[in-house]
């Protein structure tokens, strides 16, 4: 019986001949890919021992420089420090006296210092041959936030600086959720209304939206969420014309645009009540 088409053996031989007749670049690419795979495998095998060897030799070199050329940490200079304790800064840096200078990771030291809430910015650099210079920019306290009964200091950017350990009588007091973040805007506004600002005893943030201002006389001003400057300007004008801040009032509710509510002090209400009973 006659076979139709090539036999299996003939087909395999023909495929081999076609493969052998492929151009040179085909074999070059195959060999190049094979060489790359072999090279990567060798690199992976050798990478770990080479890294260990490199670290060991680098450590020996650093020890040599520290020993023979006095390149050991001897001094730390701190510039820009105002309220922070120097020992606290040194502990946070985490460096050791007589440590080889080349082993110090300046970026890691800077990152550790920036974890302190009082430090806004810091730079760390070498001063040859044996000194580290640390230059600080501290956040300064702007006010005292009464949070859950604890007095906490905070800066102009609303950053909490920790619980107040030393009395700051000159700093304004704030209360309410979100007060530190909004305090700077309020205090800048009160600069234009000093008659109110100088009497301020406590600024209370209400619902992250608006302020109540408690004055040293006990009078409380309920400011609106919007047009706060207009309300302050009107109260200042009423103080100049009628001395409203010196009246026997317990509160001035300025939250509405078309009408305000003035609440008499408990003493005056009691006097009026006695007159009515009489």
Image: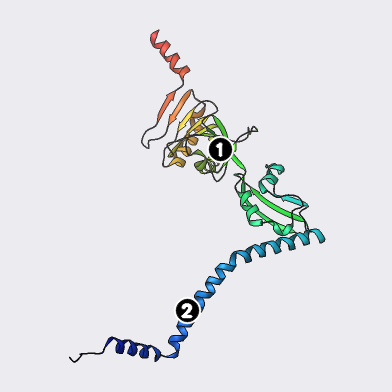
Tag 2 secondary structure: helix
Q: Which mark, residue 194? A: 1
| Residue 184 point in image, percent of width and height | 53, 43
Q: How many marks?
A: 2
Task: Measure the C-alpha gap from mark 1 to mark 2.
Answer: 79 Å
In this view, the residue farthest toward the top is 278
Task: Point out residue 104 in the picture as x, y percentages from the top left corner.
Answer: 69, 56
Could you classify mark 1 by the number of other residues whose Cα lies within 10 Å: few (under 14), some (14-19), or many (20 or more)? few
Reading the chain from its start, which is encountered first: label 1 or label 2? Answer: 2
Where residue 68 sits, quadrant-wise, is: bottom right
User: Which residue is at the far left?
Assistant: 1
Asked if residue 34 shows in the view, the reply is: yes
In the picture, the quarter occupied by the C terminus is top left
Q: Horizontally, is 221 left or right of 68 in the view?
A: left
Q: Nearer the viewer, residue 273 or 172?
A: 172
Whether residue 226 sits left or right of residue 143 in the image: it is: left
Q: What residue sits 70% from the left and 46% below the top?
A: 90
Q: How is the image coloured?
A: rainbow
Residue occupied by mark 2: 33
Q: Quadrant of the N terminus?
A: bottom left
Tell me the SS state at disc 1: helix
Q: Quadrant of residue 257?
A: top left
Q: Is residue 62 above or below residue 273?
A: below
Seen at 69% across and 61% down, the residue is 56
**Taking the image as drawn, is residue 199 in sight?**
no
244 or 40, which is in the foreground? 40
Q: Nearer the viewer, residue 183 or 193?
A: 183
């Amino acid at each position: 019986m006659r076979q139709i088409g090539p036999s299996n053996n003939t087909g395999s031989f023909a495929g081999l001949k076609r493969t052998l007749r492929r151009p040179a670049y085909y074999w070059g690419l195959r060999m190049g890919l094979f060489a790359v795979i072999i090279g990567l495998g060798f690199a992976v095998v050798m990478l770990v021992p080479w890294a260990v060897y490199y670290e060991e030799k680098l450590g020996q070199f650093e020890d040599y420089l520290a020993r023979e050329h006095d390149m050991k940490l001897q001094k730390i200079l701190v510039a820009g420090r105002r309220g922070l304790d120097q020992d606290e800064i040194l502990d946070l840096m985490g460096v050791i006296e007589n440590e080889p200078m080349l082993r110090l990771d300046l970026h890691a030291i800077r990152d550790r210092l920036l974890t302190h809430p009082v430090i806004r910015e810091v730079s760390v650099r070498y001063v040859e041959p044996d000194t580290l210079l640390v230059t600080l920019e501290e956040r300064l306290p702007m006010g005292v936030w009464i949070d859950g009964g604890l007095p906490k200091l905070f800066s102009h950017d609303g950053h909490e600086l920790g619980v107040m350990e030393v009395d700051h009588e000159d700093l304004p007091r704030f209360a309410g959720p979100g007060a530190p973040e909004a305090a700077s805007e309020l205090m800048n506004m009160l600069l234009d209304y000093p008659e109110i600002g100088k009497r301020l005893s406590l600024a209370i943030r209400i619902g992250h939206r608006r302020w109540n201002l408690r004055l040293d006389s006990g009078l409380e001003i309920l400011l609106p969420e919007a047009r706060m400057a207009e309300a302050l300007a009107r109260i200042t004008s009423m103080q100049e014309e009628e001395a409203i801040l010196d009246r026997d009032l317990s509160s001035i509710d300025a939250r509405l645009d078309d009408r305000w509510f003035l609440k008499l002090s408990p003493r005056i209400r009691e006097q009026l009540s006695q007159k009515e009973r009489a």
